[in-house]
Image (cartoon, rainbow, N blue to C red):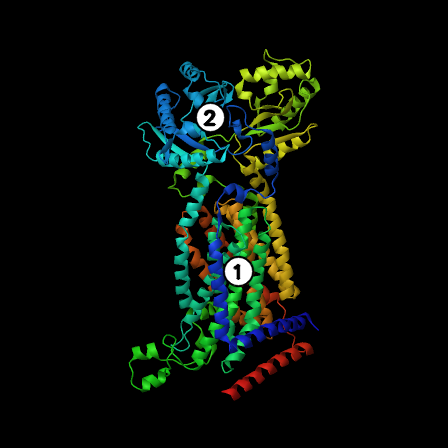
Amino acid sequence: MTVTTFYKHHEERLGRVFEMYGRLVSRYPMAIIIVCLLVNCTLFGVGILYVESETDTEILYTPRGARVYKDKAHLEKIFTDKSGSNFYPRGIIGLNKECHVIIQTKNGSNILTPSFLEEIKRVDAFVRNISESENATSSTFSDVCALRNGKCVVSGDFLFTENFKSHLLAKNITFPIFSRSVISTNFGDVISSNGTLEFSSMVFLRYYLRQDTIEALLNSAEWEEAFLHAMKSFHSEVVSVAYAATISKDEELSKNISGDLKFFCLTILIMLVYARCATSGGNCVSERQNLGRASVLATCLAIASSLGLLSALGVKYVEIAGIMPFLVLGIGLDDMFILMSCLADAEVKSSIEERIMHTMRTGGVAITITSVTDFLAFAIGATSVFLGVQNFCLFTGTAIIFCYLNQLAFFMPCMVINERRVAAQRHCGTCLRTKSRPELIADGHSKCFVFCCGGEPPKLRSDNEGILESFPKRVLQKALANVVFKVCAVILFIGYIAAAVFGCMNLKEGLLLSNIVDKSSYYHTYAKLIEDHFAIEVPVAFVCTSPLEYHDHVTQRKITDMLANAKQAPLINSNVEINWLRDYKASDFYKGSNASEFVSGIQKFLSARPDHANDVILDDTGTEIIASRFYVISNDVTLTTDQGEMMIFLREIADNFELPVIAYSYWFFDFEQFAAILPNTLKTMGIAIVVICVMTILFMPHPFLIACVTVTMTTILLGVCGFMYYWDMTLSTVTMIELIMCIGFSVDSSAHMCHAFITVQGNTRTARVNAALERAGSPVFNAALSSIIGITLLIFSSSYVFRTFFKMMILVFLFGLAHAIFLLPIVFSKFGPISVGNDREDNKASGELLGRERRAAEKDTACI
């Protein structure tokens, strides 16, 4: 038995299962529709009561099980509140609840002047006097501020001291450290020389809020809202103000995505119009517009069922899942076009049951292949370490399964009902019996009446097709018969591969915060200033988590060596170090002869140096140091790849240290994401490609087809990744989600064409290519075109998520379509398997198939 014959037998075995369902659905269409609607409506109706959403970007996009969570939990047990303090400087434990204000000179001049300093004080006074009223009480900043040594904590309040004013007048402000504090992150557009700050056009103030108790956290949250509302009304003639709060990023991102969901309603309307146009072209009897509408409805039911089922199971909705409907609508129309093409392939004179069985035998296998591969791509994506990616893939993968089931349990019964209507020669709109057009003309009716009311059942495949179904395949068949066209197509493909490889080599990682929100948002203004004008200098603490012999010179030398090694890294500022031990040894309080004297001296030192008060933790008796921390500061680290590498490097230094030390910064929550994106993306895509190849083997066990699907899937994904570079996209958690989507879509068109080529009849490769284009060319073309049209509205979206989704989907649909209708037919016409005339097994299989069809036709004729 040849490989081709084996494949035909395998196809027959799969087809029989779908034939059985085709017989069932053709006999009981209404019962199946009712069951389908009941299940979908029940899932949505019950599940909608349990819908919860997750908008915290830290939770969504920090890898689950990341080391930063464990380190944070460990440090929270060590660093507890002290008297008069509920704030830990430099964000060592976690993100302090805070509000930010950036003050910029309107003309770009130097802000380091006495007049501008007075204006900065006016802004500060405005912020401190903001109040929120609740239950007849009013809270100002002083009521909700985080305290350090009994005073409100404001990063940048050194600007209001007499010490800074005197140095400002003398023009000798030391930089980047002034009065024992790192001030480099408080100034933007900095010009410095010889350790002196000479110019800056903006300053950055941070107002920290309490969060040490539940009540304090609630009061701080209310003041945050009041702050965001009040800052809209601030006005100055000489400075402009940008602002943000801790909640700004999550709220503005959620608002940005949710606000663009209106495009989904318009997309449904566009899909309905396109489905109507693509399925139109027959007369009033053979018209199939209602089937197009039924497919869109089946897809919408699938989306609702997915949301309901997963919400009932406790899966939280994530805003990025808002792009899921656009995907599933495209998949639903893809299935519809394939099933309708297979129905058109059926013998017109056969009975309705036989035509439906034929449709399920050929089309059922085809849509199963693509639905399963799409689902598997998202199922594998659901194993991602990012919760946002995981939940998005769960919602989308489940919707794909429901879409597939609804096509079988809703669209197919609708197809049966439509076929019964056509067979009874009833009007597509009124369902009333009508006469054929020649009969109406003979009765003397007007042309308009004949056009609107006349019709008859189709006699040929062409009678059952609209212009959007017949035109593409005819053009393709003629184009692929031209040698010049084939040569040009191959040359373009080689150029495509070269451009894709170059793009992949230059693709960057990272995601700018200013991109993820609307440009009209106050947060966009704030984020843009941070990205373009302020240095990203990250404080990293080396925390000694257990008691050490700090008085011992050996221990002191080890700590000094560890910090020196950290400062040797090119990403770390070698001139800045926050070291309580060094400062203590340089003070008059130092006593190092034994442990008790060392601790006695440190207590006096900390009283004189409150800036180190939270860097040394004593036990309850005050006789032993149980933990301490030392800081290094990074250089301006703007690239996300550098941020991830810096985190890994400093952790390695801490891990290799002889004593128990943790390298930690709250920035590591973001850096964990940057360090995990590339390996996680490659891992997910690699596993998905392997799994999809295995599924291809199960459904299409022909070596040539497996090779074609695998190679085209790889080159399509290569093209998508490469052309991200040319379209100014970067690799981030957002585009990672979209790359996972592309895995399934990169298979769909190619799989349909491969399946069509291997199942059609033909004695030559060219004949089989033409037959494959006859069956799958138009469905593949229309599915891609309808998907592209459906997402075109997203061009007008203000959401970065939706805009990148549009770009990625355009790439994968265009590349997938080009591979399916141009590259694969060229490959098939040259290297594709053909049935050999003297192969007895092939002849026998073909004879059995023809015999079955002939007997079915005879049976249908007898029934009629």
Question: Dot 1 lies on which element?
Answer: helix
Q: Position of residue 293 (x, y in %)?
A: 42, 67
Amino acid marked by disc 1: Ile
Q: Nearer the viewer, residue 545 or 808?
A: 545
Residue 235 drawn above or below residue 844? above
> Is residue 767 something one can see in this rendering?
no
Where is residue 630, by image quadrant? Answer: top right
Q: Position of residue 9 (x, y in %)?
A: 65, 73
Task: Single out the mark in the foreground, 2 or 1.
Answer: 2
Residue 357 drawn above or below residue 109? below
Tell me the number on the disc at residue 400: 1
> Is residue 469 something one can see in this rendering?
yes
Q: Nearer the viewer, residue 249 or 820?
A: 249
Label 2: few (<14), some (14–19) or many (≥20) C-alpha neighbours in 10 Å: many
Label 1: few (<14), some (14–19) or many (≥20) C-alpha neighbours in 10 Å: many
The residue shown at (58%, 67%) is: 755
- Per the image, the residue denoted by label 2 is 153
Amino acid marked by disc 2: Val
Q: Nearer the viewer, residue 501 or 202?
A: 202
Find the distance from the CA under tag 2 to the CA under tag 1.
Answer: 51 Å
Question: Dot 2 lies on which element?
Answer: loop
